[in-house]
Image (cartoon, rainbow, N blue to C red):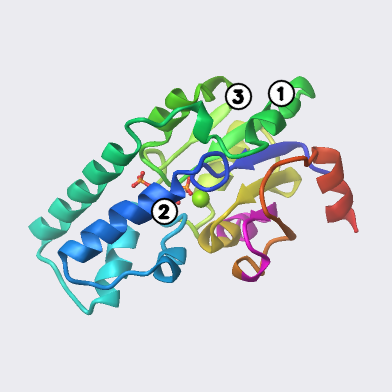
């Protein structure tokens, strides 16, 4: 049975995935590398450093260490610019309702995000108190699909991995949950997330009981 839930941030709780895409595309443009929304799928859930490596590989380019570092800083500056106005209106449909229901039912909840901006974003959304543990990109050394972020979250919730349920919008994140030995509900399109237990278009109108039933089948 599911005893704890772990939420990815970008693309699950909040619609920041589009801002990551805009910032990466702006950076790719500045390097003369064509970068489509389809290319961006592979960056979802992936750390900042790994994302830049993927973009450079797309363009068959290399950067010096200093240029690489500068590009990371630039991308994040643009990203922060895009999320400057971020507020609770950009919480994805159903996320706040589900989080509130879990709290009411006493189900422990963690954030498991690759983002180094996660704490700032949760503050802007007024959602910090919804989480019993926050594990983000500042706290882990291995990027998704490595299970580190989710295993750390499970430990902080005092729950064994097989009793944890992860909500993820990224292929790398679904893989990370699998590698952690957890259940995982994909958020988005079925075809993009074949390794999830099942896929939902979003968190709207879903309860933990309904998810338990579908996983038990
Ligand atoms: P940052 P998640 C991930 O967050 C994003 O999906 C991914 O696009 C981003 O590159 C990564 O965080 C790092 O974010 O640059 O803010 O540290 O989906 O794991 O919540
Ligand atoms: Mg995500």
Could you say whether the residue bearing mark 3 is in a helix, strand or loop?
A: helix
Task: Give the x, y percent position of residue 164.
Answer: 71, 44
Q: Is residue 154 magenta?
A: no
Task: Give the x, y percent position of residue 56.
Answer: 24, 70
Q: Quadrant of residue 95?
A: top right
In the drawing, does residue 67 fall left or right of residue 46? Answer: left
Q: How many residues crowd mark 1 within 10 Å: few (<14), some (14–19), many (20+)?
A: some
Label 3, on which residue? 130
The first of marks 1 and 2 along the sequence is 1
In the drawing, does residue 23 fall left or right of residue 100? Answer: left
Residue occupying image coordinates x 59% and y 34%: 110
Instruction: Give the foreground label among 2 and 3.
Output: 3
Could you say whether the residue bearing mark 1 is in a helix, strand or loop?
A: helix
The first of marks 3 and 1 along the sequence is 1
Residue occupying image coordinates x 56% and y 20%: 129
- Tell me where the magenta segment starts and ends, as one range: 176-191
Nearer-the-camera pick, 101 or 146: 101
Q: Is residue 118 above or below residue 202?
A: above
Residue occupying image coordinates x 70% and y 53%: 185
Q: How many residues crowd mark 3 within 10 Å: few (<14), some (14–19), many (20+)?
A: some
Could you say whether the residue bearing mark 2 is in a helix, strand or loop?
A: loop
Instruction: Give the foreground label among 1 and 2.
Output: 1
Task: Give the x, y percent position of residue 7.
Answer: 60, 41
Label 2, on which residue? 142
Label 1, on which residue? 103
């Amino acid at each position: 049975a599911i005893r704890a839930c772990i939420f990815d941030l970008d693309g699950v709780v909040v619609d920041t995935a589009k801002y990551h895409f805009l910032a990466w595309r702006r950076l790719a443009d500045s390097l003369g590398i064509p970068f489509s929304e389809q290319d961006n799928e592979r960056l979802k859930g992936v750390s900042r450093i790994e994302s830049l490596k993927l973009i450079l590989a797309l363009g068959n380019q290399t950067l010096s260490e200093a240029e690489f570092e500068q590009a990371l800083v630039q991308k994040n500056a643009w990203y922060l610019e895009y999320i400057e106005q971020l507020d609770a209106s950009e919480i994805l449909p159903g996320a706040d309702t589900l989080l509130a229901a879990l709290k009411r039912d006493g189900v422990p909840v963690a954030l498991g995000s690759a983002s180094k901006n996660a704490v700032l974003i949760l503050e802007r959304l007024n959602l910090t108190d919804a989480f019993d543990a926050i594990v983000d990109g500042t706290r882990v050394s291995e990027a998704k699909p490595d299970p580190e972020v989710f295993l750390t979250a499970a430990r902080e919730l005092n729950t064994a991995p097989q009793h944890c349920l992860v909500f993820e919008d990224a292929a790398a994140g679904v893989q990370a949950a699998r590698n952690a030995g957890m259940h995982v509900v994909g958020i988005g399109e079925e075809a993009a997330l074949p390794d999830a237990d099942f896929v939902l278009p979003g968190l709207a109108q879903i309860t933990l009981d309904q998810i338990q039933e579908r996983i038990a089948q």
